[in-house]
Image: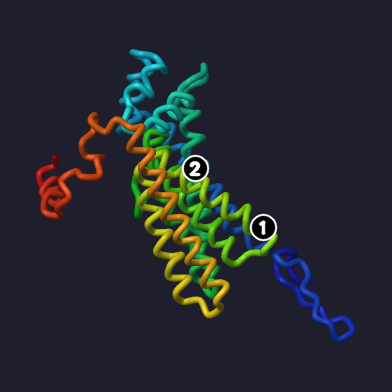
Amino acid sequence: ISPMLETRTERFSGTSLRLLSRPEWLPSTILFLLLALMLGYGIVKAYPIFDDGWLDLLVREHGTQAVHRSIPDRPLYGRLLEMLCTGSSTLRFRFAVVDILLWLLFAVEGAVLWSMLYPDRKAYGVVVALLIVTPVVVQAQLCTVTIVISSTLASALGYASLLALHAYITGESSRRRELLLSGVLLCAAGVFLSEYGVCVSAVGIVLLGSMGFNAQEASVRGRALRAAAVMGMTAVVSYAVFLATADLRTRVNVQPRFRGTLSDSFLDVATGV
């Protein structure tokens, strides 16, 4: 008798029946849970580091009402931080849960995006997801809401918009209107949250546009180019509203016209400014 977790194939009346097949998602789920546990332990032990230390001191000395007033250059981000800081429970555990959930969401999006771009290599999506979560390529996982809300959440909303618009292009006709609207709302939310949403929108426009130019069917080509145009217009309008509502004088380096030369950027990195 073969072990329970092995795949057995029996032939009955000329039909091949696959029995006791181990779910393909099980190893990936176990890896994600182990990573979440390790990440949570590291977050709780390291808290507060980097900008989390600033936020923790600000709440202790001036209260939660001072949070959004201290971040006028990202008003929606400031309001979300204020909401997360409100309450009687310990901030480090609350922030750790938010951090883990958003990074795992971002990792799942990365795996889905990989499967969308490389359907013949779908099995490697879990590798992409694990690279996103582990502090190898990006090393900001231990810093909680001050990084994960402004950067990870804004990017996750942008990629969710891209996935919704891709489903609009390739999905059923009965759901296309809802998927297009979802893509618009998600893109707008990511840009409203921080300027990171603009960068992800640019990536989405390129991917959707290339999908349209490479499509064989005229209907698919039209929907793809339409989706790229909609994402572009949404990003432009949303960023205009973001600039109108944000006070960028507090941090000059987030202004769209800041420096603008490659040599200045390298000079800043070299001098540590």
Q: Secondary structure at mark 1?
A: helix
Pointer 2: what residue?
102
Q: Earlier in the sequence, mark 1 or mark 2?
A: 2
Q: Position of residue 134 (x, y in %)?
A: 42, 51
Inspect the image, locate mark 1, and give the three-letter code of the amino acid beneath it: Arg
For the point 49% across and 28% down, the residue is: 93
Camera-nearest residue between 186 and 7 = 186
Comparing labels 1 and 2, the label whose residue is closer to the camera: 1
Question: Label 2 neighbourhood size at 10 Å, few (<14), some (14-19), many (20+)?
Answer: some
Quadrant of the rendering where the N terminus is positioned:
bottom right
For the point 54% across and 69% down, the residue is: 122
Residue 1 is labelled as none
Q: Is residue 161 above or below residue 24?
A: above
Camera-nearest residue between 22 and 58 = 58
For the point 19% across and 43% down, the residue is: 258
Quadrant of the rendering where the C terminus is positioned:
top left
Instruction: Locate residue 169 relative to residue 81 in the image: left or right.
Output: right
Question: Label 1 neighbourhood size at 10 Å, few (<14), some (14-19), many (20+)?
Answer: few
Pointer 1: what residue?
175
Residue 152 can be seen, yes or no: no
Do residues under tags 1 and 2 come within 8 Å of each other at their CB atoms?
no
Q: Position of residue 229 (x, y in %)?
A: 45, 60
For the point 52% across and 70% down, the residue is: 222
Q: Is residue 62 above or below residue 93?
A: above
The residue positioned farthest toward the bottom in the image shown? 14
Give the total number of marks visible in the rendering. 2
The residue positioned farthest toward the right in the image shown? 13
Q: Label 1 to label 2, Cα distance in Å?
A: 27 Å
Inspect the image, locate mark 2, and give the three-letter code of the amino acid beneath it: Leu
Q: Secondary structure at mark 2?
A: helix
